Image (cartoon, rainbow, N blue to C red):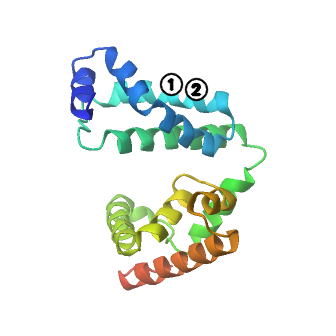
Amino acid sequence: MDDGRIVDLFLARDEAAIAHTSQKYGKRLRTLSHGIVQDLQTAEECENDTYAAAWNSIPPNEPRAYLYAFLARIVRHISLNCCRHRSRLKRSAHICELSAELEQCIPAPDESACRLDDVLLQDAINGFLASLEPQKRNIFLRRYWYLDSIADIARRYGLTESNVKTTLFRSRSKLRAYLEQEGYTL
């Protein structure tokens, strides 16, 4: 079933929308969540929470053209919140490592105009990603959006781990330069 029809089912408050969404995107959402929480049962719970969140948020939103991206964003946030909750006393080294890598590129938020800056920063990052070669963009997204390990990325693209690390380092350096050129101070 196409995304437009699934969204129509959500808007009509038809519970079949969840079944169709699960059938079409369930495995991808579970995989995304599992990459973050590193536990299959927790990933399944995050997937189910995603369907509930989509059920509650689709009537004001109509993500016909970007349903998977809409769901992926929800499952990613739920999974990250689950990690934060699980590790309040003990921080997850994996997520801290990735956050530290990107902190060198992305400016800290300024509370005064944070919302507008977030939108502008999002546009700037999207512009940067569009400027990358497809493989470099995919490596960057696999690492910082899907939170894949260096070894998994290397296997996926048939590269050495050293090559992936170098690509990520250079991409972060380019991102930093790009954001500085766009007027962001780091």
Q: Is residue 160 left or right of residue 115?
A: right
- 112 or 33: nearer the viewer: 33
- 120 or 34: nearer the viewer: 34
The residue at the point 37 percent across, 45 percent down is 69
Disc 1 crowd, CA 10 A, few/some/many (<14, 14-19, 20+)? some
Number of numbered discs overlaid on the protein picture: 2
**Mark 2 = which residue?**
45
Residue ranking furthest to the front? 158
Residue 174 spot, x, y in % from top left: 48, 81
Q: CA distance from mark 1 to mark 2?
A: 5 Å
Numbered disc 2: secondary structure: helix
Q: Is residue 21 left or right of residue 89?
A: left
Residue 28 spot, x, y in % from top left: 49, 38
Q: Amino acid at mark 1?
A: Asn
Disc 2 crowd, CA 10 A, few/some/many (<14, 14-19, 20+)? some
Numbered disc 1: secondary structure: helix
Q: Quadrant of the N terminus?
A: top left
- Per the rendering, the mark at residue 65 is none
- 166 or 96: nearer the viewer: 166
The residue at the point 65 percent across, 40 percent down is 37
- Relative vertical location of residue 162 with respect to residue 23 in this rendering, above or below: below
Residue 95 spot, x, y in % from top left: 66, 54
**Mark 1 = which residue?**
48
